[in-house]
Amino acid sequence: MSFRARKRVPDSESDFVDGYRSSKRTRGDVSKKNTDSRHSGSVADQGKLDSNGDLYWEISKARRVTISSFRGKTLVNIREYYEKDGHELPGKKGISLPIDQFSSLVSLLPHIETTLQDKGESIPRPQYDSDSKINSENKEAGDDSVDVSDEDARRNIEATSEDDSDE
């Protein structure tokens, strides 16, 4: 007769303590927590500062949208982060979009939203309260940035129309 070691029964399956809840989180617990924090209010909407002084918003526990600067260019980073030695560091997975590409993405959002709706997905529409506040502050401060861009556009049209008439 050979002696074989018996399989050990994991502690979690034993009935030693009734009502004991495992410290491990299930997927359901994580998703409920993330949805609650996403809709929690204005604190998350304001953004936070990271160790580099860049403004960021958390999409989920490990993903962030960060506004940063690199070589004088402003970038919108959508990236995964991991924790090491108490610091949150950017991972390899992610993308850094310059402002022109981010602007293109934003202009495509209505088309993306309608395509998702056609596939049966529903996405809540954001409220742009902060945008109206910024516009009202610019008007109160007498900011003429809109007029300057209109003047530049007129100059561009005049310059290109003169080139066409010479031919």
Image (spheres, grey):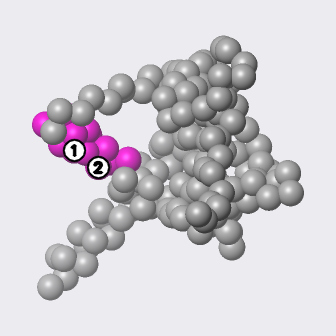
Residue 110, compared with residue 81, is above or below; it is above
User: Mark 1 sits on what residue?
Assistant: 111
Instruction: Estimate how packed mark 2 is, as few (under 14), some (14 to 19) or many (20 or more) residues with alpha carbons within 10 Å.
Output: few
Is 79 or 83 nearer to us in this picture?
A: 83
With 80 as the anchor, is 28 left or right in this view? left
The location of residue 12, given as percent across then percent down, is 65, 33
- Circle 2/circle 1 CB separation < 8 Å: yes
Identify the element where label 2 is drawn.
helix
Q: Is residue 30 visible?
A: no
The residue type indicated by label 2 comes to Leu
The image quadrant of residue 167 is bottom left
**Gap between marks 2 and 1 measured at Cα:** 5 Å
Give residue 136's quadrant in the image.
Answer: top right
The residue sitting at 59% across, 63% down in the picture is 1
Farthest residue in the right direction? Answer: 85
Q: Which mark is residue 128?
A: none
Location of mark 2 (residue): 108
Q: Which amino acid type is marked by label 1?
A: His
Residue 28 percent across, percent down from the top left: 49, 29
Q: What residue is drawn where x is 17% and y is 33%?
A: 120
Magenta region, main secondary structure? helix
Please report the bounds of the magenta region as a residue range: 106-118
Question: Horizontal and vertical percent for residue 131?
Answer: 52, 29
22 is higher (above) or lower (below) than 76: above
